[in-house]
């Protein structure tokens, strides 16, 4: 928790795990569902206390220092005693800019403040865990949504209420036509769904893309250094790196006690871990050109208006 919010009293004490979604290939064809856009941003839980706001990330870390302009706006625009679930986004004339969000995760406060002025962020709310100091997590989704709509009926920029529909055709339209505006997919929720922290209780359908890729790695067991050059019939462009967690799993794979050649390989793995550990946070980032989207004719509107039209 941030030091500013450490002594603040909230309707629900942070941190709390957000409710998650399981991936599906298509929107549900049967049953009663509420559909929402899935925005391409940073998942965030916002806790509004008596005097302060605490912004929590999906992995329970504070986000306030990276979005100072949003922190102050949430204090001014949200009533006391509410806890909201939503997405932090940065809107541009071409849609939402995820790369601009990643740039905010910078250790220098001066850099963050400069970016906050140049590319201000917004908060799109899609669920209410508490309102007026009263917890709503045990209430069904339809009731939480009604309470959220009432709470944000007069919401002003940079706070928005995400669209919602019962109409599957409308949700399919969002999925097919608004990727370029920053729509990352569609979320389906049962109207009777309670808020379940950490559980994959919702359904998400994301845009699927395929690509032909070349995977490069470091051989951990080799007798001498070898130099080579990959020959490809087309220009190669870097599209990303292994996530830190996956890199750690790979380096620790097959760590059973060994002797002889196995022991030497294990020692080489340990040396490689030490070298890879020095890379720190440099792994796990998708290169900007790999995230580009083609512009849409109808994707140039306001943040939520683009998907609601």
Image (cartoon, rainbow, N blue to C red):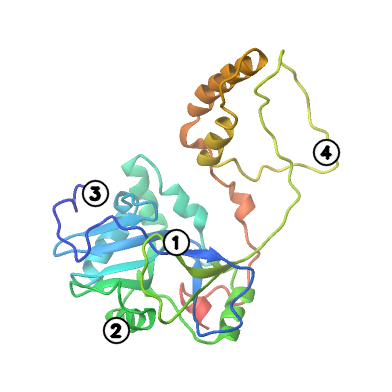
The residue beneath circle 3 is: 2
Residue 228: x and y, percent?
A: 78, 24
The residue positioned 61% from the left and 44% from the top of the image is 240
- Estimate the spatial distance between the alpha carbons at disc 3 and disc 4, rounded to whole Å: 49 Å
Mark 3 burial class by Cα count in 10 Å: few <14, some 14-19, many 20+: some
Query: Can the viewer see residue 223 in this picture?
Result: yes
Residue 261: x and y, percent?
A: 67, 15
Name which of mark 3 and mark 2 comes first in the sequence: 3
Mark 4 burial class by Cα count in 10 Å: few <14, some 14-19, many 20+: few
Name which of mark 2 and mark 1 comes first in the sequence: 1
- Estimate the spatial distance between the alpha carbons at disc 4 and disc 1, rounded to whole Å: 37 Å
Residue 138: x and y, percent?
A: 30, 74
Name which of mark 2 and mark 4 comes first in the sequence: 2
In this rendering, the label closer to the viewer, 4 or 1: 4
In this rendering, the label closer to the viewer, 2 or 4: 2
> Would you say 53 lies left or right of 44 here?
left
- Estimate the spatial distance between the alpha carbons at disc 2 and disc 1, rounded to whole Å: 25 Å
- Estimate the spatial distance between the alpha carbons at disc 2 and disc 4, rounded to whole Å: 58 Å
The residue beneath circle 4 is: 232
Query: Can the viewer see residue 120 in this picture?
Result: no
| Residue farthest right in this picture | 233
Q: Nearer the viewer, residue 134 or 267?
A: 267
Q: For numbered disc 3, what is the local secondary structure?
A: loop
Q: Nearer the viewer, residue 271 or 174?
A: 271
Contact (Cβ within 8 Å) of mark 2 with mark 1 = no
The residue beneath circle 1 is: 90
The residue positioned 70% from the left and 18% from the top of the image is 222
Q: For numbered disc 1, what is the local secondary structure?
A: loop
In this rendering, the label closer to the viewer, 2 or 1: 2
The residue positioned 40% from the left and 59% from the top of the image is 198
The residue beneath circle 2 is: 150
The quarter of the displayed image where residue 89 is located: bottom left
């Amino acid at each position: 928790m941030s030091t500013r919010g450490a002594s603040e009293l909230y309707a629900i004490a942070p941190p709390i795990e957000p409710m998650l979604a399981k991936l599906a290939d298509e929107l549900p064809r049967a049953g009663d569902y509420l559909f929402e856009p899935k925005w391409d941003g940073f998942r965030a839980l916002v806790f509004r206390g008596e005097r302060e706001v605490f912004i929590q990330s999906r992995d329970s870390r504070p986000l306030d220092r990276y979005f100072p302009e949003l922190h102050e706006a949430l204090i001014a625009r949200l009533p006391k005693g509410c806890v909201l679930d939503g997405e932090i986004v940065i809107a541009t004339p071409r849609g939402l800019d995820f790369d601009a969000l990643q740039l905010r995760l910078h250790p220098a406060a001066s850099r963050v403040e400069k970016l906050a002025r140049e590319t201000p962020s917004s908060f799109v709310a899609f669920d209410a865990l508490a309102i007026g100091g009263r917890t709503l997590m045990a209430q069904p989704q339809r009731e939480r949504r009604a309470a959220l709509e009432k709470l944000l009926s007069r919401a002003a920029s940079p706070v928005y209420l995400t669209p919602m529909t019962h109409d599957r055709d409308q949700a399919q339209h969002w999925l097919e036509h608004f990727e370029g505006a920053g729509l990352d997919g569609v979320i389906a929720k049962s109207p009777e769904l309670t808020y379940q922290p950490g559980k994959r209780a919702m359904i998400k359908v994301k845009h699927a893309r395929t690509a032909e890729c070349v995977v490069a790695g470091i051989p951990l067991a080799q007798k001498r250094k070898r130099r080579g050059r990959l020959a490809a019939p087309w220009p190669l462009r870097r599209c990303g790196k292994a996530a830190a967690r996956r890199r750690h799993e790979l380096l620790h794979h097959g760590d059973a006690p060994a002797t002889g050649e196995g022991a030497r390989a294990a020692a080489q793995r340990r040396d490689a871990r030490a070298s890879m550990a020095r890379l720190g946070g440099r792994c796990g980032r998708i290169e900007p050109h790999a995230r580009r989207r083609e512009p849409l004719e109808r994707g140039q509107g306001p943040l939520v208006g683009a998907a609601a039209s």
